[in-house]
Structures are given as structure tokens and as C-alpha cells.
Image (cartoon, rainbow, N blue to C red):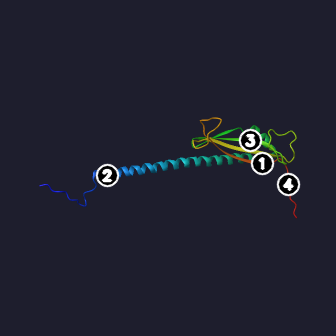
Amino acid sequence: MLSSRSARPDDGFTLVETMVSLALIGTVMAAVSAFFISGMSGSHGQVQRQVGAQLATDAMERVHSIPVTDIENALTTSFTPRAVVVNGVTFTQRWALCWQPATGGACVTPKPALAAAGALVKVTVSVTWDHPGCPANPTQPPRRTCEQASATLFATAVTEPVLKAA
């Protein structure tokens, strides 16, 4: 006599139920891992931007440590592009110098022969590095280059202004 099998509470899952649940778990894990990889890539790019900003600040601090009377000579002789490697990424620091008339107008390089007493020295620092998330480099198409820049003005006057009390 054939007897029909009755379900008991401790029978467990059938093979079909197990296969369906594994397929669902696999699909969910694939979607979650895509978000995880995207988040890690964005985080890595953010870390590089933060390092670039810190290196730009460091380069500007080097400029601020120079006496204003020596800034032109120092920037044209000892401040050549400098490569800094952080976490396997090469960052390049560059300095640019031009003279800004106190009355306004275009910044010029080299220093004009008759620089006015109130002329300002404009120093621009740029830090560049390659990263796949950066814009395409127009001069080197396969490269994708990020840049962090900072600029400041220095007064060429040797004496500080004196303010009179009212």
C-alpha cells in the first residue's frame, strides 16, 4: 500500500526552495557589491582630492616662509616642479609668479623694468595628479588629470603700513 507522505514540522526545505533562495541571495549580493565598489571608488577619489588640497596648502606655506624681498629670486631658482608620492599616486607641485600692478590690470611675467612701488607679486600654486575620475587632459588625451590650485598676493613694500588712531 502506498502511503502519502505527510509533512512534519522538522522535514526542512526542498531542493527547489533552497535553489530559489540561493538565487535571490546571489542577485541581492551582486547589486549590493556594485554599490560597494562604486562607493569605494568615490571614496578613493575624495581621498586624492584631499591630499591634493593639503599639498597645495603645503606648497603655499613654503612660499609664505620666504621674505618678500627674496620671493622673486627664490621662486625662479629653487622652486622647480616637485613630485610627491602619496599612497602610490604621484602628485606634482608647481609654482608660478607674476607681477600685478597695484592699480589693477593684467598680471605680467617677467617683472617689469619699472615696477611701481605698490606692485604686488601674485604666486599661484598648482598640484596635479592622474586619476580615472578626473577630466580628460586635452594635451595628453589618454590621461585624466586632476588639479588643485591656490593663489595669493604679496606686497612688495618692505615696510608695513602704519594706521593712525582717530
Q: Which residue is mark 1?
A: 153
**Percent x, y for residue 121?**
79, 45
Number of other residues with Cα within 10 Å of mark 3, as a class: few under 14, some 14 to 19, many 20 or more = some
Helix, strand or loop at label 4? It is: loop
Q: Which residue is mark 3?
A: 96
**Disc 2 residue type (three-letter):** Thr
Q: Nearer the viewer, residue 110 or 38?
A: 38
- Residue 32 falls left or right of residue 76: left
Q: Which residue is mark 2?
A: 18
Nearer mark to the viewer, of 2 and 3? 2
Mark 2 and mark 1 in contact? Answer it, CB < 8 Å. no
Nearer mark to the viewer, of 2 and 4? 2
Q: Which residue is mark 4?
A: 161
**Percent x, y for residue 128?**
65, 42
Among numbered discs 3 and 1, the one appearing first in the sequence: 3
User: Which quadrant is the N terminus positioned in?
Assistant: bottom left
